[in-house]
Image: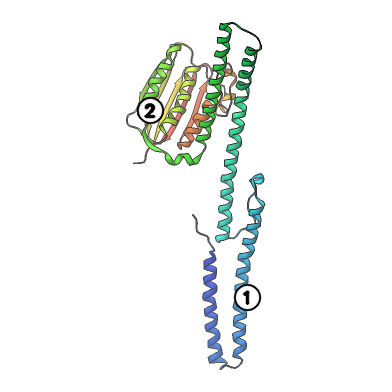
Amino acid sequence: MRKPVNSLIKKLFFWYVGSLALLAIFIVLVVHVFAFKNGFYFILLLFLTLALFGFIIIYKITESLTYLSSRMRMISSKNLDERVDGIDSHDEIGELAQTFNQLLDRLHLAFKREQQFIADVAHELKTPLATLRSTLEIALNQKRSEDEYRRTLKEAVQETNRVSTTLKNVLDLAWSETPMEQKNAVSFNLSELTEELFELAQKMALKKNIKVSGSFAKNIKIIGFKEKLGRALLNIIDNAIKYTPTKDKVEIVLKKNKNQATIEIKDNGIGISQKDISHIFDRFYRGSAREKTFGSGLGLAIAKAIVNSHKGAIEVKSEIGKGTVFTINLPLVSS
């Protein structure tokens, strides 16, 4: 932490040293110059002078503390955007005010994350829960055949799975935005992770007869969370396969670039318009060309948040009708 420029301890120290110096000067004057004549008045004047300086210093300290205390009492959960201002001193009191403001910043951010989490859950669960309820109510209203009941239960299970997936997505998003979790990061082999995801991508692409090719640099290590980063990369790979035409191809590349690892996920799919490309990492955003495909609109938002939590960066380049390239850069383990 930055040390205060004008420390209160320094002020009190200089006052103490100054007091001793003044006392010495007055004693010399009284003894050698005035020969004790009117010495009592000089001593009295000395103490009054020292008391005045001491009072001024203490008054300045208590005035700042009183103001700081009153401002702190005024701030509650209803006005966390307020800050302690009006204290310009560069001493410990100014440092205390600055630290308190930083604490308020963290609290305000935590409240915003909580509100965003609640809004996300409400936004995504409203439709599937309403659909599930209406499906079951219709099934109970009249007698149906065994096949109709099976179909209704199948629809109910699908909606339940959608709710479960949405909750997992929102929780992952909340996790990636919580700095406290980052303390448990460990070193892991990114090369092994991308190879595992490559094998999984090949299985995912079988249904559409899409060819998945890959090229992976060996023994690349980073610090983070293997499972979470794998989830982020899998979201991007899933998107690439989802929007690539049947019998086309997807490519996954891992390479070392100076002090960072670079992952590229390329597809020959439908592409993303320039209008949509600046919003694809927004929560619940679904571009016009992708609206007919099932999904919560959280996959890429989660991917970006997780990459950011690994101190990385994600970029996207796309051209309509030609495909999309996602580039993820992650810092390597320091040597």
Residue 198 visible: yes
Image point (59%, 5%), residue name: 145
Closer-to-camera residue (156/11): 156
Image point (66%, 57%), residue name: 70
Residue at the front extreme, as displayed: 143
- Picture disc at residue 193: 2
Asked if 304 appears above or below 145 in the picture, the reply is: below
Image point (61%, 7%), residue name: 144
Image point (46%, 35%), residue name: 312
Residue 293 visible: no
- Crowding near the residue tagged with mark 2, few <14, some 14–19, many ≥20 C-alpha atoms within 10 Å: some
Secondary element at image label 2: helix
Query: Disc 2 versus disc 1: distance between alpha carbons?
Result: 71 Å
Q: Quadrant of residue 335?
A: top left
Q: Which residue is mark 1?
A: 52
Q: How many marks?
A: 2
Residue 87: x and y in percent read 62, 58
Residue 239: x and y in percent read 49, 21
Asked if 259 appears above or below 60 in the picture, the reply is: above
Secondary element at image label 1: helix
- Crowding near the residue tagged with mark 1, few <14, some 14–19, many ≥20 C-alpha atoms within 10 Å: few
Closer-to-camera residue (269/322): 269
Q: Quadrant of residue 23?
A: bottom right
Q: Is residue 259 left or right of residue 289?
A: left
Disc nearer the start of the sequence (2/1): 1
Q: Amino acid at mark 2?
A: Leu
Q: Amino acid at mark 1?
A: Leu
Asked if 140 appears above or below 260 in the picture, the reply is: above
Residues at badges 2 and 1 in contact (C-beta under 8 Å)? no
Residue 255: x and y in percent read 37, 29
